[in-house]
Amino acid sequence: MNNFILHTLAQHLSKNLTKYLTKYLTKYLSKNLTKYLTKYLSKNLTKYLATYLSKNLTKYLAFGILLCAFTSQAQQYPRRTLFMVNPYAVNPAAAGVNRDIPLYTTYRSQWNGTNTHPKTFFLTANKQLPNGFAIGGVLFQDKTGAYSTTSFEFTGASHIAINRKQSIAFGLSGIGTQYVFDLSNAVVQDPNDVALGGGVKQSSFSLNANAGMMLYGQNYFFGVSIPYLLQPKLNFGNGNINERVIRHYQLMGSYEFSLTKDWGLSTSVFTRFTEVTPIQVDLNTMLNYNRDLCFGLTYRPKSAWAAMFGWKFEGYSLWYAYEMNTGIAQALGFSSHEFTLGYTIKAPRGFRQKTLTQKRGLLTL
């Protein structure tokens, strides 16, 4: 009887063991083998391809990535190294931070060494009004290769006193911008490419807005601004070129230390980023003598160094910044130059309208 039972079990196992093993192995392998192979290939094949490509395409990929990151996005709102001299250029809330009327004009030549490097010009003015209000305006022009922009910005700001020595301000600007894409004088590989519009000059007009907030006293300010708040779409000519203006986010701050009766030291930070570009930080320090003669340095991590100089005389001010790109940023050009000329119109003293006192106004460089 026992032999019969054992014989029956042996027949059953020999008949079904292969079936069970095949079923189990198939199920296990289909579940895990793909997982292991995917993990192995993603770890090793990507590494192999990256090594191979880095030997052959590093220069071109680096240039392409930088050009897209800096020109297509960041250059929509050009860099301003001397922001601490004219805070209104980067934050509409800075309109009217003191009683006088500052006029500034700036020219910036960026990434010199290429025929298509960005060239930027802007003119700013702002004025404090009674009862804590202020107005301002910016005329702006930027050209990068075949792509250029011209815009006018009008600002309204409101200043609220916190105490006798500090205030908070909110600003909003309306902007009208004309964008132009002109390949008439450019050299291209395929003149028949439909995306180029046949080399015909194309343009697009858009309305946008900048918003900002600033907390400030006589020797410091901290603020946030959001340029290109509305993110309008641009449609050039026949619609072959479509682009969206990207919203930017900017944080800024500056504090001045009094070293002696004649010497002062200002430190400042400027940070900006978008949804599609990494954070870019400027760290600045400026030494000044009687606020008339200034020397400073800027460090932009993994990107650039800059030396700054400023001279003020009889209401005029002259500023210059020379930047040297470092690391991979040198693929775009070795240096940049920024010039700023300012003139301050003294506001009448002693009138009885409610304006910010000098103690609460920002004493800018």
Image (tube, helix red, strand yellow):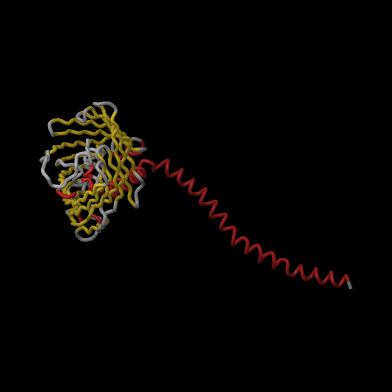
Residue at the (45%, 45%) spot, across then down: 50
Comparing 322 with 236, the one in front is 322
Rendered location of residue 350, percent (x, y): 11, 40
Residue at the (16%, 51%) spot, across then down: 154
Q: Is residue 225 left or right of residue 204?
A: right
Residue at the (16%, 36%) spot, across then down: 341
Rendered location of residue 263, percent (x, y): 26, 27
Comparing 19 with 167, the one in front is 167
Number of marks drawn: 0
| Above or below for 296 versus 213 | above
Residue at the (18%, 52%) spot, across then down: 156
Q: Is residue 59 left or right of residue 183?
A: right
| Above or below for 184 versus 13 | above
Q: Quadrant of the N terminus?
A: bottom right
Q: Quadrant of the C terminus?
A: top left
Quadrant hosting residue 203: bottom left
Q: Is residue 67 left or right of residue 238?
A: right
Comparing 337 with 330, the one in front is 337
Residue 194 visible in image: no
Residue 124 visible in image: yes
Rendered location of residue 305, percent (x, y): 31, 34
Q: Residue furthest right?
A: 1
Rendered location of residue 62, percent (x, y): 36, 43
